Image (cartoon, grey):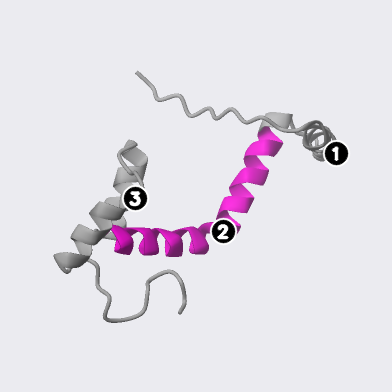
Amino acid sequence: MAEDNRLRIGLGEIYRDLLRNDAFQRGSSETQQADSLLGAKLMEREKRIMERNKYLAWKRGITPAQLWIDVLSGNAKPPTVEELSDLRSRGLIDESGDVPGLGI
């Protein structure tokens, strides 16, 4: 069976009106214009999203690829204080250098 790629979002009245007018002015449907706008914004933020993924993976003591897969599969969750303490005590969080994704 094909995966349903639809995403439903709720826009406030002003943003719905802006989207409707933007779509009209560009000669596209609201759905097409919303898809275009969201795609453009994600492309704009792609580098930052990847950097934050590196940080969150570092914090969990796993690779960025593993966190990416965990997020896509719905298995990612924030670590508890106890889990962080355990990861640190086992040396799985590298505290010897820069914190990835934070630019510090």
Tell me the distance, in whole angstroms, between the alpha carbons under discs 3 and 2. Answer: 16 Å
Instruction: Please name the predominant secondary structure of the magenta segment in the image.
Output: helix
The magenta stretch spans which residues? 32-60
As shown in the figure, which amino acid type bears the numbered disc 2? Arg
Mark 1 residue element: helix
Q: Which structural element holds mark 3? A: helix
Residue 56 % position (x, y)? 37, 59
Q: Earlier in the sequence, mark 2 or mark 1?
A: 1
**What is the x, y in percent for residue 90?**
14, 65
- The quadrant in which the C terminus is found is bottom left
Type of the residue with mark 3: Trp
- Most extreme residue toward the left is 90
Residue 101 magenta-highlighted: no
Left or right: 38 with respect to 63? right
In the figure, 42 relative to 27: above or below? below
* Residue nearer the viewer, 24 or 76: 76
Which residue is disc 2 drawn over? 45
Q: Residue at x 34, y 50 (%)?
A: 68
Task: Give the answer, above or below, for where 62 lies relative to 94.
Answer: above
Q: Residue at x 81, y 31 (%)?
A: 13
Question: In what quadrant of the picture does the N terminus appear?
Answer: top left
Q: Amino acid at mark 1?
A: Gln
- Local SS, label 2: helix
Residue 56: in magenta span: yes
Q: Quadrant of residue 63?
A: bottom left
> Residue at left 56%, top 58%?
45
| Residue corresponding to mark 1 | 25
Q: From the viewer's perspective, is the residue at label 2 or at label 1 nearer?
A: 2
Q: Which residue is mark 3?
A: 68
Residue 92 appears in the figure = no
Residue 4 placement: quadrant: top left
